[in-house]
Image (cartoon, helix red, strand yellow):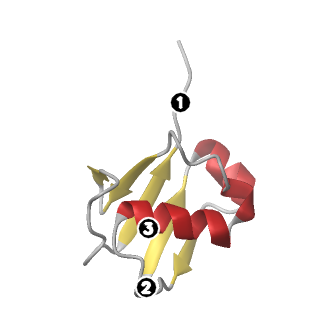
Amino acid sequence: MVKVLYFAALRELVGYEEELLELPPEVQTVRDFVAHLERARPALAGKMVSVRVALDESFANDSDALHGAHVIALIPPVAGG
């Protein structure tokens, strides 16, 4: 079980700021997680391309393993000036 944190526009798309998810065994990497999440939350489909993923407060790459992660934060790009 992992806690997923949604920030900014992602929070608006899914309608809540966090949730607990049980991940299937085949979800092993950040890339797998993003694909799974886009299927599970259709509002996110196609919108995860530029989203940064953090595992337990450290930014992760697509190929990083989820093994042992307790919190997955999804951080979309932020515009500002």
Taking depth in this image into account, of 47 and 1 the one nearest to the observer is: 47
- Distance between mark 1 and mark 2 Cα atoms: 28 Å
Which residue is disc 2 drawn over? 1
Tally the marks.
3
Say what secondary structure mark 3 lies in: helix
Q: Earlier in the sequence, mark 3 or mark 2?
A: 2
The residue located at (41%, 60%) in the rendering is: 31
Mark whose residue sits in front, 3 or 2: 3
Query: In the displayed image of the protein, which residue is found farthest to the top?
Result: 81
Left or right for 76, reference 56: right
Left or right for 45, reference 56: right
- Distance between mark 1 and mark 3 Cα atoms: 24 Å
Say what secondary structure mark 2 lies in: loop
Residue 15 seen in render: no
Which residue is disc 3 drawn over? 32
Q: Earlier in the sequence, mark 1 or mark 2?
A: 2
- Distance between mark 3 and mark 2 Cα atoms: 15 Å
Q: Earlier in the sequence, mark 1 or mark 3?
A: 3
Left or right for 17, reference 68: right
Q: What's the amino acid at mark 2?
A: Met
Which residue is disc 1 drawn over? 78
